[in-house]
Image (cartoon, rainbow, N blue to C red):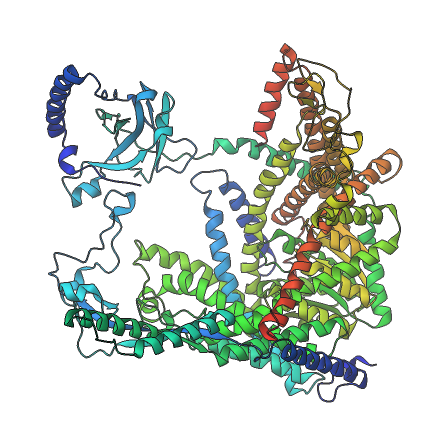
Amino acid sequence: MLQRTIPLLILSASGLVLILSYFSPITETWSEQVVSWFNILAGVAFVLGAGNLLAVNLEKISSKRPGWAYAAITLVSFGAMLVVGLSKWGSVPDAKYPNVHLAGSQDSTQAGYGWAYEYVLSPLTATMFALLAFYVASAAFRAFRAKNLEAILLLGTAFIILLVQIAAGAFLTNWIPEDSFFAFLRAESLKAIVTEVFQTAGMRAILIGIALGTAATSLRLILGIDRSALSKG
Amino acid sequence: MSSEGMQQSGGAPKSDTRLWIALLIFGAVGIFAGKVWRPGPLAEAYVEVVTETRVLAEAVAPPAAQPALAAPSGSMGANAPLPGASTSEDSSPTRVWVESNDPRFQSGELRRVEGVAPEVWDERSRVDPKKAKEQIATLEGDAERLSEPTDPTGLTQEEFEAREAARITALKAVESTRIVASPRDSIGIWVAALLTLGIFSFLVRDNPFYKVVESILIGVSAAYWMLVAFWSTLVPDLFAKLAPDLVRATMLPGLVESEHPGKDFLLALIPLALGVMLLWRLAPRGAWIAVWPLAVVIGTFAGMRLTASIEADFMAQIAATMKPLVAFTPGSLEGVVDGSVSGAVDGVSYATSAQGFDLGGTLAGVLGVVGVITVLVYFFFSLEHKGLVGKTARVGVWFLMITFGAAFGFTVMGRITLLVGRFDFLFNDWLGLSP
Amino acid sequence: MQFRIPEFIRNRAFASACRLAVGAVIMLAANLTAVAAPMPPAAENVRLDDAPDDAGGVLIVSWKTPDPTASAGIVIERSATAAEQEKDANALWIEVERLGRDAVAGVDGSYSLKGVPNDEDTRVRVSILGIDGELSEFVESAPARPSASLFSFKRLPLLIVVAVVSLSVLVWVALARSGAPLKIRRIAALDAVDEAVGRATEMGRAVLFVPGIQDMNDIQTIAGLTVLGRVAQTAAEYDARLEVPTCRSIVMTAAREQVQAAHHAAGRPETYAEGNINYITDEQFGYVAYLSGHMMREKPAACFYMGAFYAESLVLAENGNSIGAIQIAGTAEPSQLPFFVAACDYTLIGEEFFAASAYLSGERDQLGSIKGQDVGKAFAIVVILIGTILATIAAVDADGSVGVWTESVVASLRSFFGG
């Protein structure tokens, strides 16, 4: 009862309340309140995440599992960043309250946290992001080998858009007179046709589908039709 | 190679040595090239240092005339209590930290609080190395020029004193501007460069260098987001509501007194209670209670998204699709000049009400509706993709592929720009190769 | 910009006296020069009404400008609240806003007064600012107080559509229970789930499930976790090792609940291993760095990407491709669908992703709800066709009576759907 039925009742009740609240001016801001509560909950839940991170890596180290040294590196960087950021080590005092150390700002690189952000986290994430340039190329190549109509449409469109983006498109098609029958083949017209006709239509249908899917998923959960999520035991 | 061998942290497997050598060669060539190209140190970093001083002062003025902090009385929020304007001020007047040369000391509004040492600290801000070097040279020249006493010949005593005073002021200004090399930022650039290379090394294959970098990234980023959640959500939205005085004394001295602290406290208890229930998983008994906050989260967001998606996507997209299938060019009997969507055809003109039939626009309109409907047919779950439905769905798939291709094409350039950014960092900031 | 009229000018008696004096001077001057600007005529029909469809606290001020050409703006003042008068007995009127020429350009003007107390009467008075900067007589409104409405009538169309969509789902669930035939087309991506998990079991490798990078407040994450439940049940039945690294702490907790429940449902609660479901980091690219390395080292035989994905989609799919894993992706993030489509074996596009969990469950109720979604799509197609046909008639016969009528029908259809 406590473990099965009550969670389902809580789920249904909170869902129905939020749906109905949107239709009354008095309660329509409840969703904002819920979002702010969720953010706090997510903040508290970091205890679970941190606990799991510590447990997994400590276990690797203590059992000397292969790669335990990497676990140690993860733990040390995690711990160091946490200590530096919580203690605001090296932070710049707030001009209005220079006596309250924890009110200081740690965004500049003279604070440990700011340094770690600028020289460790930010280059790492930016480079990881930049790797995508290589992956885009290999994905395009892979799709190119598929040799079916769908792949050709996808890549052909991508290629046209890319050409237009890098001005080569204009260079290649500028000779087509603007007032001729074939003017639609000019780079800028092709791009407009692709985005304003095909992409707009495709996106509209996708969004309508997603909206229905979202609504149906929500209904299945709220009405208890799909009770897989909370029904253990 | 066994996956165990790949993960050994001690001696790297043999085939990885090639990679290490390649990286070393790359590094050596890069550094050498940097030296040849433009002799100078790698990873140069300069900062401008500004020393800030604040002293504690208290208001001298009688309690009736508070410092001019009054909010505009005409505004609607005027009845909110002013921060710090509580009744206890008679016993301890408002104390503020101000610059030591604050004009209010002169006017007598403020006076120093005795026995409290001033707070002094340096603020450093990065300066572009090239500009920094130019500025340093200028400053040195200025200092040298200004350190020469004024030549008194041909000047009256008054002129001489005025010039001398100006010289000393200027000299002080020059001397107080400190642009210095910053080893900690140089080290930072080295660290960033090595980490960047570490990520790139994954393109060749998984290797110990990448594993070290990956481990650092996981550790630092997990801590980073926890810190963000702590300082920007938990402190202002939870702790400040539960214990405002404590938070004001320790972390947020500028925290404004709430108008209804009791209500804030009770409202903050709700997420706290949910959080405690969630953390109860770690308790030896009753871990099932952790499902309750999950039920609240799933329920509330399912409810919220249901109305939001029907309103913003379903209804809005349907409304946007209701457009005429035929298009006319306004006010042209010859028809046919359409710039936005497509070209046009000469001579085709059905003149209705002084308008021309626009073939391109009409085609675009028809294709738009056909696209939406065929893709929706593709999504139908009740109908097997056979016969007419199958053909329609296939047209829908074509529309989807063109849609995806366009998104693909638009993304490629962005990704290449990011890559260029990283190379720019390696070659300019680190190796100092910029001309 | 806001500036205040000095208090003595606001005093009506003084102001009237001044105006009389000024008026006398002006009349004299007018006789002499005949070019002095006239004082703007006062606003007419000043009303204060409750704003509809809100939670109170807002009143609408409306007025008529008798001579827009001679007016440069308008000053709106409200009566002080009881609390304000308690503080300062002299504060009878408080200036709220000085609006520029736009507010008096037409004959009818309005302004919404916000932050009004619901439990006491409020009055406003307005004065028109002449083109030479002179203020007209203040005209006062009758008192009003805002009231909260229980139902938001502007959302009535939404309520109707939500009801239509919900009812079509509910009716189909009821039909499914009463034994109506439930034919659903095959979804290749979902039929491949068994094959993928089976292959991983045969090869003795893991199944990797990535629930996206968003938190539980995203419906895609929730939908992804319901799919996880089905995949976990299959994995439990096959006794395959299922790994779920997560990007969020709450998602980790929810995934653990989900997988544990799946093991119970498969009748093998003893094989549930919490240690396979771990939190990595909230950072998008930190998470990707982990997944990339992990995939290269562990070489999972099947990879599922179900949830909200952003730029990392392609890194994951390409890495999975390079290790030869069967990859099944599902997301409603339109910008990432191209990359999954290009690099994965199967991709659930948008709505298919949301139907996946119901499809995989095979339960009659859930299959019925999928049919309900189809009713929603049919509704959309019908409305779009009607709207498009009417709009076309309106465009062809723009000047005819039929065209005008259809135009008005299309316009009201569009406004019903919020366009």
Please state if B56 lies on the left or on the right of C294 as rendered: left
Does any portion of residue A194 appear in the rendered image? Answer: yes
Q: Where is residue C145 in the image (x, y as percent from the top left)?
A: 30, 32
* Residue B371 drawn at (x, y percent): 75, 35
| Rendered view: B206 above or below C312 | below
Placement of the N terminus of chain B among the 4 image quadrants: bottom right
Q: Is residue B133 left or right of residue C274?
A: left
Which residue is most to the top? Answer: C401
Nearer the observer, C2 or B128: B128
Residues C254 and B140: in front is B140
Instruction: Tell me the residue at 57%/73% (across/down).
Output: A120
Q: Is residue B141 above or below residue B293?
A: below
Residue C407: quadrant of the picture: top right
Q: In this view, does B285 lie above or below C57?
A: below
Question: Which residue is at the far front?
Answer: B154
Q: Going by the picture, which residue comes out furthest to the bottom?
A: B11
Residue A58 visible in the picture:
no
Q: Quadrant of residue B221?
A: bottom right
Q: Say which of B209 and B248 sits in front.
A: B209
Q: Position of residue C19 (x, y in %)?
A: 14, 24
The quarter of the picture where the C terminus of chain B appears is: bottom right
B290 on left or right of B173: right
Q: How many labels does the image show?
A: 0
Could you say which quadrant of the image residue B201 lies in? bottom right
Location of residue C129 in the rendering, given as x and y in whole percent from the top left corner: 27, 28
